[in-house]
Amino acid sequence: YSKSIGKRSTIGASCSNQSQAAPLTVEEQIITIYTGTNGYLDSLEIGQVRKFLVELRTYLKTNKPQFQEIISSTKTFTGEAEALLKEAIQEQMERFLLQEHVEKN
C-alpha cells in the first residue's frame, strides 16, 4: 500500500464529497474524476484540493467554454474535450500554485 495510493484515495474521498444542495453536473464530475485519477492533484496538500477544483471548474467555464459544449452536445468525453481539460488543468495549476505562494508570504 504505497504512500501515493494512500494519498490518492484520501484525495478521492475529498473530491467526491459533494453538497446535497449543490450536486455536481456531469461536466464537473468529469473534471473532478479526471483530475484526481490522473495524478494532477498529487502535488497539492489535502486541504488545497477542494479549493483547486472549485477554481478549476470556474476557470474552465470562463476560459474554455467549448469543454462544456462538447460534453453537453456529444454526451461523450472526446479527445478534444480531454485536450481542453489538460490545458486548463496545467494553466490553472500554475496560477493556483503562484497564488498559494503569494498568500503564504
Image: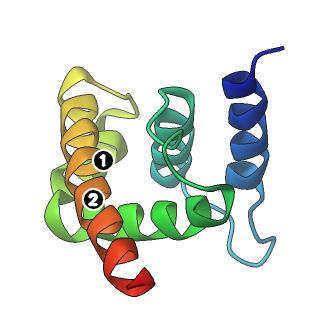
| Above/below status of 56 relative to 33 | below
Judged from this view, the residue extending furthest toward the front is 105
| Above/below status of 101 relative to 68 | below
Residue plotted at (68% across, 33% down): 8
Image position, residue 12 (x, y; %): 71, 41
Image position, residue 89 (x, y; %): 30, 47
Residue 77 found in image quarter: top left
Q: Amino acid at mark 2?
A: Gln
Residue plotted at (31% across, 33% down): 74
Element assignment for label 2: helix
Element assignment for label 1: helix
Residue plotted at (47% across, 26% down): 38
Image position, residue 96 (x, y; %): 33, 66
The image's mark for residue 89 is: 1
Mark 2 and mark 1 residues within 8 Å of each other at the beta carbon: yes
Residue plotted at (40% across, 74% down): 100
Q: For this rendering, which residue is in front, 50 or 85? A: 50
Return the residue at label 2. Answer: 92
Left or right: where 40 falls relative to 84 = right
Left or right: where 12 falls relative to 27 = right
